[in-house]
Image (cartoon, grey):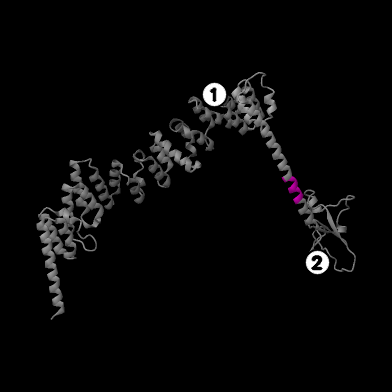
């Protein structure tokens, strides 16, 4: 028996059985199962595949076979895929969109499909499914500007990915407002991450008529780098005042290019007391700033914190003078003044008979603060004495060490060898604790009882003082 011939007959037999089963399923109306069986029975035979597609078309079941068509290495003619896409476009927009996402773009004539979608959009111009699919077709066709316009119109989340992936920054210079209206945070992050492609000046120009969006952009830019928007700091004062007062004070604190007079004018017009206080203190008018805290905010704790921050005796005097007829203020001062101003100065000025809330507790706190200061001073004194003794002992040990003197050492005055060539002769060498060495005769006549290194004493009396004399 011919084995090859037998195998072919067997394969043909299996194929006939498979086709018979497919026909049975079609006749039974189980089109999905029939289409799925086509993958195994038809294999890589393109002619058989196309015949089956046309058969499914004839019975109105192209949708059933669409999900099983070969789209990998084996591919049918483009007209087959286009026929199925057109079928979905007529009856099922969602299914059409799914096929466009799943099928590689080279399976069909992209231009023909774009034209077909455009025709359908004439009947339903606001259909988001068709518009999104058209944007995907434009993207595959590298017509990114058209895809970008559609995504912006739909406010589609993929618009930022499209811009970054295909470097479309030159196309969005006049669309910045649209992008920010859609998602301010994503738009600003994208613009700041690509300042080399869209300059800050260009963004500011585009947002000039939308100050609320301009504020969002400049605020994030300022947070990233204070120096990059220096020339816009004056504009930002008004923007913060109008749209974001909680961040106005932090901005004024961090900015080194903010015109203080302009900021003060805006804050005073809007009666922003805390910001005005900060600006006055920064401009050196601390007394006026303290007065505003006491009179307008009526906040003794803030007044005390301000006085502590400035550490100015005149401010403490002003604070005490203002508080002396206000018992709640006196209580606050008694609780906080102890470590900055002598509490006796305040206590002596309190009018006799004045009722002060929690006076006993305040006085106890003053005594406790005083005791704490005494303990701290004693502790510091012990540490200082211990450190001084330790350093003195270390210096004594260092000075008591021997000093090596040999033929390599020279006299710092005459610059000759410190030791004589004939060691049998008597000689005198002076070695200071600073390790400078001299022949005794090279040193100037010393003050009785004192002798210093010429080199070190020229700077100041210090480690060169004292000496060792060798004979």
200 sits to left or right of 384: left
Instruction: Name the residue furthest bottom.
Output: 1
- Residue 355 lies, in percent from the top left, at 62, 20
Residue 119 falls within the magenta-colored stretch = no
23 sits to left or right of 135: left
How packed mark 2 is, by other alpha carbons closer than 10 Å (few <14, some 14-19, many 20 or more), is: few
Q: Is there any visible trace of residue 198 in the rendered image?
A: no
Q: In 3D space, how far apart are the residues under numbered discs 2 and 1 (Cα atoms)?
A: 82 Å
SS category of the residue bearing label 2: loop
User: Is residue 454 shown above or below 156?
Assistant: below
Q: Earlier in the sequence, mark 2 or mark 1?
A: 1
- Residue 194 lies, in percent from the top left, at 41, 47
Residue 49 in which image quadrant: bottom left
Residue at left 12%, top 66%? 17
How packed mark 1 is, by other alpha carbons closer than 10 Å (few <14, some 14-19, many 20 or more), is: few
By secondary structure, the bulk of the magenta-drawn segment is best described as helix
Residue at left 45%, top 38%? 219
Mark drawn on residue 168: none
Residue at left 18%, top 54%? 82
**Along the viewing direction, whichever of 385 and 202 lies nearer the viewer:** 385
Q: Which residues are magenta?
A: 383-390
Reading the image, the residue beneath label 1 is 296
Reading the image, the residue beneath label 2 is 407
- Of badges 2 and 1, nearer the viewer stands 1
| Image quarter in which the N terminus is found | bottom left
**Along the viewing direction, whichever of 450 and 374 lies nearer the viewer:** 374
């Amino acid at each position: 028996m011919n084995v090859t011939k037998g195998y072919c007959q067997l394969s043909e037999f299996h194929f006939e059985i498979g086709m018979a089963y497919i026909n049975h399923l079609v006749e039974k109306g189980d089109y999905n199962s029939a289409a799925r069986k086509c993958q195994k029975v038809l294999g890589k035979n393109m002619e058989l595949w196309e015949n089956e597609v046309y058969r499914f078309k004839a019975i109105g079941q192209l949708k059933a076979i669409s999900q099983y068509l070969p789209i990998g290495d084996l591919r049918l003619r483009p007209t087959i895929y286009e026929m199925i896409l057109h079928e979905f476009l007529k009856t099922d927009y969602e299914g059409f969109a799914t096929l466009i996402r799943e099928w590689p773009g080279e399976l069909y004539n992209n231009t023909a499909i774009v034209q077909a979608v455009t025709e359908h959009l004439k009947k339903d111009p606001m259909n988001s499914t068709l518009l999104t699919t058209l944007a995907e077709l434009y993207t595959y066709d590298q017509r990114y500007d058209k895809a970008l316009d559609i995504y912006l119109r739909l406010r589609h989340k993929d618009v930022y990915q499209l811009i970054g992936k295909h470097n479309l920054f030159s196309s969005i210079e006049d669309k910045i407002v649209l992008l920010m209206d859609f998602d301010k945070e994503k738009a600003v992050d994208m613009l700041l991450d690509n300042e080399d492609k869209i300059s800050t000046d260009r963004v500011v120009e585009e947002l000039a008529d939308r100050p609320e969006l301009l504020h969002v952009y400049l605020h994030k830019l300022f947070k990233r780098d204070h120096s990059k928007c220096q020339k816009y700091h004056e504009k930002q004062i008004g923007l913060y005042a109008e749209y974001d007062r909680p961040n106005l004070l932090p901005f004024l604190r961090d900015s080194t290019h903010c015109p203080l007079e302009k900021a003060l004018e805006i804050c005073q017009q809007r009666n922003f007391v805390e910001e005005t206080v900060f600006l006055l203190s920064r401009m050196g008018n601390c007394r006026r700033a303290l007065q505003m805290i006491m009179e307008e905010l009526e906040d003794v704790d803030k007044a005390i914190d301000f006085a502590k921050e400035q550490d100015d005796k005149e401010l403490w005097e002003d604070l005490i003078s203002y508080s002396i007829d206000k018992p709640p203020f006196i209580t606050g001062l008694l609780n906080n003044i102890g470590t900055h101003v002598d509490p006796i100065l305040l206590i002596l000025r309190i009018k006799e008979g004045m009722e002060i809330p929690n006076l006993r507790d305040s006085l106890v706190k003053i005594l406790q603060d005083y005791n704490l200061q005494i303990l701290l001073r004693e502790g510091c004194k012990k540490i200082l004495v211990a450190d001084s003794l330790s350093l003195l002992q270390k210096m004594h040990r260092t000075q008591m060490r021997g000093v090596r003197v040999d033929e390599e050492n020279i006299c710092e005055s005459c610059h000759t060898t410190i030791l004589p060539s004939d060691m049998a002769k008597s000689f005198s060498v002076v070695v200071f604790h600073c390790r400078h060495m001299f022949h005794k005769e090279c040193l100037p006549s010393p003050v009785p009882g004192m002798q210093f290194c010429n080199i070190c004493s020229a700077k100041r009396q210090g480690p060169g003082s004292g000496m060792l004399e060798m004979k």
